[in-house]
Image (cartoon, helix red, strand yellow):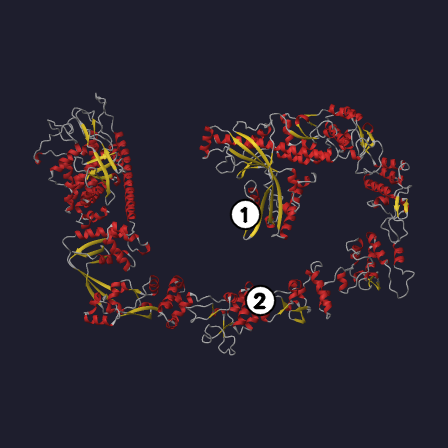
């Protein structure tokens, strides 16, 4: 919980300016604080004419002002100021300790020099603050919930401000603040006048120490703050709060925004308004102060003249006003106070301001500034009072040049004009002394001022003695000579030098008056002075002796001798016998005899001084004893003495105690010198006893001791005349007088037979236990019986034999009288007897009824914290719990009225259970003695209910009895369920768990068939009738099978995980309850699953010729298994879909039959199936299906056993639903199909990462080849310089010559195939093993790669082979060998071409036709056909499919070509793998017409599905590997062509170069892929992959 004082101060501050009247703070139904605010009617504040009400920039103007007084009352709980005490002991090893020694051993330099500093040091102030804080905390702790009321009075000045801003400024400000600036607003400043501060002063120390209004009064730290609704961190720098709701704060609302352009201007103007308001408020305060001064002057009868009395009277208020409106530095922004102060000083048009002077409140133009206290004696000029000179406000007046000073010439002229009064003389002397010390005035100037200065010493101006300062030689040092004694005329009276220091007086040329000259002056002028000031006067003589006594130690020996010689012949010592000379007087302590002239009326005079001047000190002790101890002359024999001479003796001896020898003290202690009181009742001290007692045998005179009958010292006088702290009392204490009786004496008195004496002594012992320190005596160890018992007034016992807790009486212990329970600790009586004794009595005498048990156990429950482990162990094994036999009462408790308790038995707490239980009440012993008693039994080993270990042990030992008691299999199953919940805990007890596995305590069910079912079974043959056993005929309901529960061993019970097997063999099985929790429990104890007992023998027919249905089913099963397993947790899944894809094979056979047999029984059953599976360790799982219609439930039954650990009927039906429904229907049923698609995307990302790694490997190989190439070239000598070509264009590396096929294409005329020239691609097809007779395919591919070729007349030679081109062996006729380009550079470009491919992210693609002129050949034209396609769908592997926008029905196209599109997408994936190309960069598009086989759009490759459908689809669907090889080689070359476009856009020789190099470099991978196609066994699942995913694509 936060600090309450901080919360209260925050609430008080928040109430200052808000429109609330009351705030209360409650904590847990306790009212911590109540704040109330009351306001008086407002008063209008006049605005002077010469006030500039407009601000500096003219945006705002003060139109009116008003003032109101506010009172805030706070009633708070004292706990607000409570602080926990924290020890302030220094930590060991702190910096205060010296190195190797403690600070107490070696004094530090700080402590040494601190002795030389001023007495009021920081440590003393800190100690005082800690002392005050401790005193406050003591007051608060006495009554934390008490309330204290505090109040505070404030003054609120409110101004109405009108704004005049331009439209542009308003718009900019509205844009910055989101609201328009107000036309009219209000500002308020909160101050506290002097009267209001005085009215807010707190007399209550709690209210003064706990300052709720600490932050409300602006005069306290940190000063005034700016309120924007609530207080901000910004201070005003002056003693006033500023409420400016229209000021724009920062975003945090903790300070004013002075940074933003338009907001800064607005806030500056607002602060200037605050400065104008402060100036008007200051003028109003000073006007009120001036009115008060005039009123006080009239009341004092001074007319219109303002005197110093009035100035001094209102000086605090003037100081308060100036301090309130003095501006310091504001925080955190110092600009705030600067702006307000600037407006404050410039608010008036005239350079003048009101100031408090010696003539009242006047403008600064009429007031002068006196140096130091000059204005105190120069009354003719209004000056600033001394108290205001050092104020910050006056300093600013000096700084601004608004006030001037007075010169010394003015002072001298004023002194010559009139005589000084008493006060003015004091001021003048002080001023002159200070000036003389500082050297501001030299000696001649001082003398000139003294010569003209004359003063009148009268109280009334112009009366009294005249003092001419020019004749003064001495000043009075009151530390030696008081001011009221007569002094020589050359000495100035002390009253005029009181305020001046000795150095100042000496600077004026004056010397101090010494004692010897003063005493000589007194003696010489003694006859001329009146009686009161004559040495004949007792009072004056005593005063003179006192002055001499105080100065005696400081006098020199010669001065002392002079004083003695002056006083000895004069009767200057006052005595009882009149004025005596020093040698004739005795000390005042000698009061033994009345006729001695003892010194009187000389208080404070030192004995050493009196002895030095001759005063006598003592009387002879022998004389004293002989005169005082002798009987009086008029005493008769046998008569009791009535005098009080022993008092005189004691008083005298006490006065001279320090002078009494030790032997005399021993004699005084051993001698009976004091009588005891023997007077009548009420007047005991008036008469003494005949017997005298030693002082150590009697007691001090006290009424409490008189009531006890003790011998009391006779001390005549009124009651209370004897004081133990007096000199006589301390002396008697030294002699051994007794102040109170001892504890053994009081115990003897309390054990006496007199009841009155017992009562009085006990009352005295209780009431004076703390005062007399009786706590130091162990009263409880006393064996005397003196304490009364409750209920037995005649018997007394010792403190150890009784106790205060009445509940322990149930154990036979005695109880102290109730009236003495509050004082039991004083007598040493314990609250409870020792726990060991209580336990022994409980075990020895256990309770015999439930009522006794409740009482006894309840008492022990109240002392649970005192029960140790040994006591608990002893009680836990003791038979103390009374229990009746279960057949005695219906509720199990003892019948209290029954007289025969034959069936009552006692059990130990460990054998009992608390409360009641509907399940175990008949099995275990449950008791209930109430909450308190039950808590005691719970501590001693009882439990609320049996533990799982106890239940399990009982179930293993007596399962049949337990089942019989529960009378319901369901209740018994509930018991087993509770054991199943803690199976892991039961396994820890290995012995118990082994016993559970071997005990016949598990409950299983056996299904007994009905009569009609038996008839049907007999009518049908064997167990083959199981499928027809469930007849839904209503008449069979009466003869439905019956489930019989029976106890069995865990090994005899089976868990039904195969419903079909259960349906066949249920009559021979004991089954566990069909609950997951119980099945797990049964299996842990040794039960077997039914699936492990049923043996299946699968018999298969011949494999079918066509496996298309098997392939299609495999694809469908793999897809649906992902969705199905997604709904299961990993713990329940045996194999996931990835594993299934690698290890599952589907095969169609002619027939399937399944024979089931139950192990251990001669039972079997055979049925025909449409689906079943087998498992081979080498070949994995094979799912066999029959040709024709398929039973999806049997497929689900087989697959769930492969996928799940413990499949159930729900799993079979769910997977059957997944197989039957399409994705749309599954999504409509709430299955998240999109997750599977996202999972596929994740797989593609992994494949993409593998592709990237492969590209990195190839990049590294290129670098290695480059390094090898560089090393080889260094060994070859430089070739001769070649003649440069005349053309400026350099031939590209690897380009063909002018006789290249590109420049000399063959005519386009048709020719027989055998005469067709074979290009490079036909050779590639032969090398790949593709012998296609389709010339159309060859033509389209060649046209696609070479582009359109113009007719040409002659044929050119074939281009060089790839080996030649890559090795650089191409040569030109008639020229030297040309250095070929490095192959690594070509390979790097090829990799760049592949890496430049990217995915096409847009759903549309449109590229208009364009024609580019090729500069190498003017007749060459590169025509790119226009494309206008849009996104349609994603293939099964994620490849994006686009179609021409002109197609009439895209959906119909998709439905007709789903299988073909998926096949094409898979083929393109293989091509991407060859090139290590990202699969996302490959796309499929379809158009109905056009010659575009493929195109490259900014790195995205698009392949035309129309060409694939017409050229390759039928061959691939046939299942012949040759068809796939042909299609792959075709599109491998097409993709190479498009990849080359990533490097070269036009179809030129450079493009052909990179196309052929791509083919050459990736030819080995294509060969490997073709070989894989050829060696692949026809896989029905592979061939039907696309058709199997047809529905997925449609979804």
Q: In the displayed structure, does residue 222 sit left or right of residue 1524?
A: right
Residue bearing mark 1:
2
First-in-chain label (1 vs 2): 1
Q: Position of residue 1529 (x, y in %)?
A: 17, 40
Packing grade of label 1 (10 A; few <14, some 14-19, many >=20) is few
| Between 746 and 57, the one nearer to me in the picture | 57
Q: Position of residue 622 (x, y in %)?
A: 89, 56
Q: Quadrant of residue 1516?
A: top left
Disc marking residue 967: none
Is residue 1389 at all visible to an observer of this figure? yes
Q: Position of residue 645 (x, y in %)?
A: 86, 58
Q: Are discs 1 and 2 less than 8 Å apart at CB? A: no
Q: In the displayed structure, does residue 1285 sit left or right of residue 251?
A: left
**So how many labels did they put on this image?**
2
Residue bearing mark 2:
835
Q: In the displayed structure, does residue 648 sit left or right of residue 1324?
A: right
Q: CA distance from mark 1 to mark 2?
A: 44 Å
Residue found farthest to the top: 1286
Give the mark toward the camera: 1 or 2: 1
Q: Residue at x 85, y 58 (%)?
A: 646
Is residue 91 at all visible to an observer of this figure? no
Q: In the image, is residue 1380 above or below residue 849?
A: above
User: Could you say whether the residue bearing mark 1 is in a helix, strand or loop?
Assistant: loop
Q: Position of residue 1385 (x, y in %)?
A: 26, 32
């Amino acid at each position: 919980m936060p600090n309450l004082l901080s919360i209260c101060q925050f609430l008080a501050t928040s109430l200052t300016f808000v429109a609330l009247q009351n705030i209360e703070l409650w904590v847990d139904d306790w009212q911590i604080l109540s704040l109330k605010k009351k306001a008086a009617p407002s008063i209008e504040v006049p605005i002077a004419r010469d006030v500039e009400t407009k601000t500096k920039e003219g945006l705002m103007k003060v139109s009116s002002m008003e003032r109101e007084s506010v009172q805030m009352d706070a009633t708070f709980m004292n706990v607000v100021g409570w602080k926990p005490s924290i020890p302030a002991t220094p930590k060991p090893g702190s910096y205060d300790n010296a190195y190797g020694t403690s600070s107490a051993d070696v004094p530090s330099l700080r402590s040494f020099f601190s002795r030389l500093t001023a007495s009021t040091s920081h440590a003393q102030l800190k100690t005082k603050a800690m002392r005050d804080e401790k005193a406050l905390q003591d007051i608060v702790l006495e009554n934390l919930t008490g309330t204290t009321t505090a109040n505070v009075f404030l003054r609120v000045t409110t101004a109405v401000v009108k704004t005049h801003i331009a439209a542009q400024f308003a718009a900019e400000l509205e844009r910055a603040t989101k609201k328009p600036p107000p036309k009219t607003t209000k500002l308020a400043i909160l101050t506290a006048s002097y009267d209001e501060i005085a009215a807010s002063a707190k007399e209550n120390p709690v209210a003064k120490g706990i300052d709720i209004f600490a932050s409300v009064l602006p005069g306290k730290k940190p000063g005034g703050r700016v309120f924007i609704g609530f207080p901000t961190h910004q201070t005003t720098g002056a003693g006033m709060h500023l409420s400016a709701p229209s000021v724009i704060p920062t975003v945090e609302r903790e300070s004013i925004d002075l940074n933003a352009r338009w907001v800064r201007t607005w806030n500056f103007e607002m602060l200037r308004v605050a400065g104008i308001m402060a100036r008007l408020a200051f003028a109003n305060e000073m006007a009120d102060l001036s009115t008060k001064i005039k009123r006080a002057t009239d009341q004092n009868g001074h007319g219109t003249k303002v005197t110093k009395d009035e100035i001094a009277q209102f000086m605090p208020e003037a100081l308060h006003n100036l301090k309130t409106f003095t501006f310091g530095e504001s925080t955190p922004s110092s600009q705030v106070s600067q702006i307000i102060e600037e407006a404050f000083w410039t608010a008036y048009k005239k350079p003048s301001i009101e100031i408090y002077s010696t003539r009242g409140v006047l403008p600064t133009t009429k007031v002068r500034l006196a140096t130091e206290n000059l204005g105190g004696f120069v009354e003719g000029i209004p000056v600033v009072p001394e108290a205001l000179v050092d104020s910050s406000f006056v300093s600013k007046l000096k700084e601004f040049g608004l006030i001037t000073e007075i010169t010394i010439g003015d002072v001298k002229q004023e002194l010559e004009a009139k005589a000084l009064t008493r006060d003015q003389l004091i001021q003048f002397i002080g001023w002159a002394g200070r000036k003389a010390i500082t050297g501001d005035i030299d000696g001649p100037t001082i003398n000139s001022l003294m010569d003209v200065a004359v003063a009148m010493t009268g109280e009334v101006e112009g009366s009294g003695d005249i003092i001419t300062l020019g004749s003064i030689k001495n000043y009075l040092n009151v530390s030696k000579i008081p001011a009221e004694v007569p002094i020589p005329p050359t000495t100035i009276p002390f009253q005029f030098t009181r305020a001046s220091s000795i150095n100042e007086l000496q600077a004026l040329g004056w010397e101090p008056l010494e004692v010897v000259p003063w005493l000589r002056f007194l003696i010489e002028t003694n006859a001329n002075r009146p009686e009161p000031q004559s040495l004949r006067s007792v009072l004056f003589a005593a005063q003179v002796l006192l002055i001499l006594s105080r100065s005696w130690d400081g006098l020199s020996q010669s001065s002392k001798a002079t004083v003695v010689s002056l006083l000895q012949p004069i009767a200057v010592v006052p005595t009882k016998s009149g004025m005596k000379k020093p040698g004739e007087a005795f000390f005042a302590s000698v009061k033994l005899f009345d006729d001695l002239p003892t010194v009187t009326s000389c208080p404070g005079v030192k004995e050493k001084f009196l002895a030095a001047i001759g005063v006598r000190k003592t009387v002879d002790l022998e004389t004293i004893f002989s005169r005082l101890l002798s009987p009086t002359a008029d005493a008769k024999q046998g008569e009791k003495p009535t005098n009080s001479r022993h008092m005189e003796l004691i008083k005298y001896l006490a006065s001279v105690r320090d002078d009494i020898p030790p032997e005399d003290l021993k004699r005084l202690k051993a001698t009976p010198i004091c009588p005891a009181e023997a007077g009548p009742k009420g007047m005991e001290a008036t008469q003494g006893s005949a017997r005298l007692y030693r002082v150590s045998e009697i007691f001090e005179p006290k009424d409490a001791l008189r009531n006890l009958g003790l011998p009391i010292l006779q001390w005549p006088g009124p009651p209370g005349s004897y004081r133990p702290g007096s000199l006589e009392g301390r002396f008697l204490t030294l002699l051994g007088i007794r102040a109170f009786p001892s504890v053994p004496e009081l115990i003897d008195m309390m054990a006496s037979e007199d009841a009155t004496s017992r009562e009085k002594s006990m009352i005295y012992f209780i009431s004076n236990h703390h005062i007399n320190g009786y706590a130091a005596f162990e009263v409880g160890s006393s064996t005397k019986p003196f304490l009364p018992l409750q209920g037995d007034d005649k018997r007394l016992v010792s403190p150890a034999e009784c106790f205060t807790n009445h509940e322990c009486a149930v154990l036979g212990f005695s109880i102290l009288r109730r009236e003495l329970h509050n004082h039991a600790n004083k007598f040493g009586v314990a609250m409870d007897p020792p726990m060991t004794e209580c336990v022994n009595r409980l075990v020895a005498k256990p309770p015999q009824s439930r009522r006794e048990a409740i009482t006894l156990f309840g008492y022990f429950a109240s002392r649970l914290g005192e029960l140790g482990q040994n006591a608990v162990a002893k009680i836990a094994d003791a038979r103390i719990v009374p229990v009746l036999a279960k057949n005695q009462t219906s509720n199990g408790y003892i019948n209290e009225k029954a007289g025969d308790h034959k069936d009552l038995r006692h059990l130990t707490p460990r054998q009992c259970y608390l409360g009641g239980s509907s399940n175990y009440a008949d099995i275990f012993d449950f008791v209930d003695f109430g909450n308190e008693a039950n808590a005691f039994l719970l501590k001693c080993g009882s439990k609320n209910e049996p533990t799982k270990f106890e239940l399990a042990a009982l179930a293993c030992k007596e399962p049949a009895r337990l089942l019989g008691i529960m009378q319901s299999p369901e209740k018994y199953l509930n018991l087993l369920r509770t054991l199943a919940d803690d199976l892991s805990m039961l396994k820890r007890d290995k012995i118990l768990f082994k016993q559970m596995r071997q005990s016949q305590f598990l409950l299983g069910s056996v299904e007994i068939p009905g009569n009609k079912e038996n008839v049907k079974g007999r009518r049908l043959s064997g167990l083959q009738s199981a499928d027809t056993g469930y007849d839904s005929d209503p008449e069979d309901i009466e003869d439905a099978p019956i489930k019989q529960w029976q106890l069995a061993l865990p090994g005899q019970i089976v868990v039904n995980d195969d419903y079909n097997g259960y349906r066949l063999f249920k009559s021979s099985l004991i089954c566990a309850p069909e609950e997951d929790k119980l099945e797990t429990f049964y299996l842990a104890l040794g039960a077997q699953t039914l699936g492990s007992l049923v043996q299946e023998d699968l018999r298969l027919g011949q494999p079918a010729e066509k496996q298309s249905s098997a392939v299609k089913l495999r694809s469908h099963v793999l897809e649906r298994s992902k969705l199905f397993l997604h709904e299961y947790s990993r713990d329940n899944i045996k194999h996931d879909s990835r594993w299934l894809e690698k290890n599952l094979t589907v095969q169609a056979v002619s027939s399937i039959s399944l024979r089931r047999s139950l192990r251990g029984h001669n039972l079997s059953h055979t049925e025909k199936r449409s689906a079943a599976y087998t498992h081979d360790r080498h070949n994995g799982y094979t799912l066999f299906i029959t040709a024709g219609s398929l039973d999806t439930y049997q497929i689900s039954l087989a697959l769930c056993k492969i996928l799940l650990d413990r499949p159930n009927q729900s799993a079979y039906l769910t997977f059957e639903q997944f197989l039957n429904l399409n994705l749309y229907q599954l999504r409509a049923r709430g299955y998240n199909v999109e997750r599977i698609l996202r999972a596929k995307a994740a797989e593609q990302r992994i494949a993409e990462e593998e592709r990237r790694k492969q590209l990195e490997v190839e990049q590294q190989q290129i670098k290695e080849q480059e390094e090898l190439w560089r090393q080889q070239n260094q060994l070859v000598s430089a070739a001769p310089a070649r003649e440069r070509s005349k053309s400026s264009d350099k031939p590209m590396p690897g380009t063909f010559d002018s006789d290249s096929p590109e420049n000399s294409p063959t005519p386009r005329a048709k020719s027989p195939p055998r005469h067709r020239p074979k290009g490079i691609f036909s050779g590639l097809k032969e090398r790949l093993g593709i012998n296609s007779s389709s010339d159309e395919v060859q033509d389209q591919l060649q046209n696609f790669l070479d582009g359109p070729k113009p007719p040409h007349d002659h044929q050119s030679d074939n281009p060089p082979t790839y080996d030649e081109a890559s090795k650089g062996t191409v040569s030109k006729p008639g020229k030297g060998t040309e250095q070929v380009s490095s192959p690594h550079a070509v390979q790097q470009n090829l990799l760049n071409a592949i890496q430049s491919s990217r995915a096409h992210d847009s759903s549309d693609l449109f590229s208009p036709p364009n024609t580019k002129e090729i500069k190498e050949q003017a007749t060459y034209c590169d025509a790119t056909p226009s494309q206008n396609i849009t996104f349609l769908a994603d293939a099964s592997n994620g490849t994006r499919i686009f179609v021409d926008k002109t197609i009439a029905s895209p959906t119909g196209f998709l439905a007709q070509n789903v299988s073909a599109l998926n096949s094409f997408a898979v083929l393109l994936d293989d091509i991407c793998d060859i090139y290590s190309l990202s699969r996302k960069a490959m796309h499929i598009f379809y158009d109905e017409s056009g010659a575009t086989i493929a195109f490259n759009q900014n790195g995205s490759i698009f392949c035309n599905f129309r060409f694939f459908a017409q050229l390759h689809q039928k061959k691939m669907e046939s299942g012949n590997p040759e068809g796939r090889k042909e299609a792959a080689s075709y599109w491998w070359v097409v993709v190479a062509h498009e990849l080359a476009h990533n490097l070269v856009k036009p179809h030129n020789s450079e493009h052909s170069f990179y196309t052929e190099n791509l083919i050459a470099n990736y030819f080995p991978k294509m060969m490997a892929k073709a070989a894989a196609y050829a060696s692949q066994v026809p896989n029905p699942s592979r061939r039907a992959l696309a058709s199997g995913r047809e529905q997925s694509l449609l979804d």
